[in-house]
Image (cartoon, helix red, strand yellow):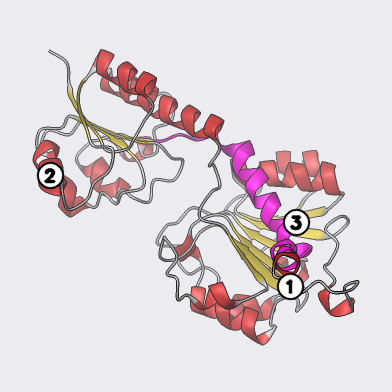
Amino acid sequence: MKPNVLLYKKVPQASLALLQAHFDVRYFETIDDSNRAAFLSALTEAEGLIGASIPMPAELLDTAKKLKVASTMSVGTDQYDLAYLAQRNIPMMHTPNVLNDTTADTIFTLIMCTARRAVEMANLVCEGRWKSNIGESQFGTDVHGKTLGIIGMGRIGYAIAKRAHFGFDMKIQYSNRSQKPNVEQDFNATYMDMDALLKTSDFVCVMTPLTPETEKLIGAREFAMMKPSAIFINGSRGKVIDENALIDALTQGTIRAAGLDVFEVEPLPEDSPLCTLDNAVLFPHIGSATAETRLKMINLAIENLINAMKGDLSQNCANQDLLH
C-alpha cells in the first residue's frame, strides 16, 4: 500500500505522475475558502506533505498525527517550525543549490536597476516625460569598481560575490556567522563585522535566512550607519528588515536607493509607501522564478520526499541535526 501524501502546490503533469508512482496523492493546486475544509481533512491522514508558499505552523500540523516527512519546494524553510518537527522526529526536506545561480541573477538585476535607476527612467520614457537629454539630477551611479557588502555568505551569497568580482571588478566584503576562507581565496573578499560592513559598503546586500536571531536584523540604527550614497538590496526574507525604518531611510535620503524582492507582507499591499518612491525598485518575490529552475525545485522536492520516506536523509534535510 502506497504512503498517503498531501500535495498543496500546482505542479506539471509529469511531476504529478512521478509522485503518483510512489504515493497515494491528495492534490490541491491551491488552498482557499472553497477547499480549506477538505485540505484540513486530508491533512489528518497525510504521511507526507509537499508544496510551498503556505505557512504550516505547529498548531496546524498538530492535526497531522500520521505525518512522517515534510518536503518544501523551496530552499527557505521559514513556513515550518523546524524545532517542532524535530520534536516529532519529522524530517524537513528542502531544495538548496538548484536555485543559487538563478537567484543570484535576480539579485544582480536589482543591483543594476537601482544603480542605473532603470525603472524610474523607463517610466520617464513611457509617460511622455522625456523631452530632452536627462540632467545631472537623473544620473545613476556606477556598479563596476564599487564595494559590495554581503550579509549572509551562504550558497547564494557566494554566487552573487562571483558575479560581482569577475563581472564588475567589485571589492567584496562580507559578514557571516563564521568566516569563509574559500570566499576570501576565490574573490579576495574581506571578512568583517556587520557594523563595519554597513559603514564602508557602496551596496549592502542581505542574504540571511529568517530566524528569530535575524528578524529585523536591519533597522533604523543600521540604515543610519550606511553611506548616504549606499544602495540597499534585500533578497532574503522581508522580515529580516524593519520595513518602516527602510521607508524612512529612503524618504529622508539616509541612503540612496533600495532594491527589494521580498517584503514583510506578501503580496505587498497596494497602499504601501514603498510603491510611491522613485528610489525603490520592487520585484514580486521572483528570486528563483524561471521555468527551468522552478521545475528543478519541484522535482528535487519530490526526490527528497521519496528518499526521506525510505529513511534516506543524506541529502537536503534542513533539520537533520535536530532529529533524534
- Tell me the tag on residue 199: 1
Q: Residue 279 at what x, y percent from top left?
A: 68, 73
**SS majority, magenta:** helix
Q: Residue 142 at what x, y percent from top left?
A: 86, 62
Quadrant in the picture for residue 98: top right
Quadrant in the picture for residue 221: bottom right
Element assignment for label 3: helix
Which residue: 17% across, 46% down? 61
Which residue type carries mark 2?
A: Leu
In this orientation, which residue lies closer to the viewer: 304 or 172?
A: 304
* Mark 2 and mark 1: Cα distance apart in space: 49 Å
Write the start and end of the magenta stretch as one range: 94-122
In this orientation, which residue lies closer to the viewer: 244 or 191?
A: 244
- Tell me the tag on residue 40: 2
Which residue type carries mark 3?
A: Met
**Mark 2 / mark 1, whichever is N-terminal:** 2
Which residue: 83% across, 43% down? 167
Q: Residue furthest bottom?
A: 252
Membership of 103 in magenta stretch = yes
- Tell me the tag on residue 112: 3
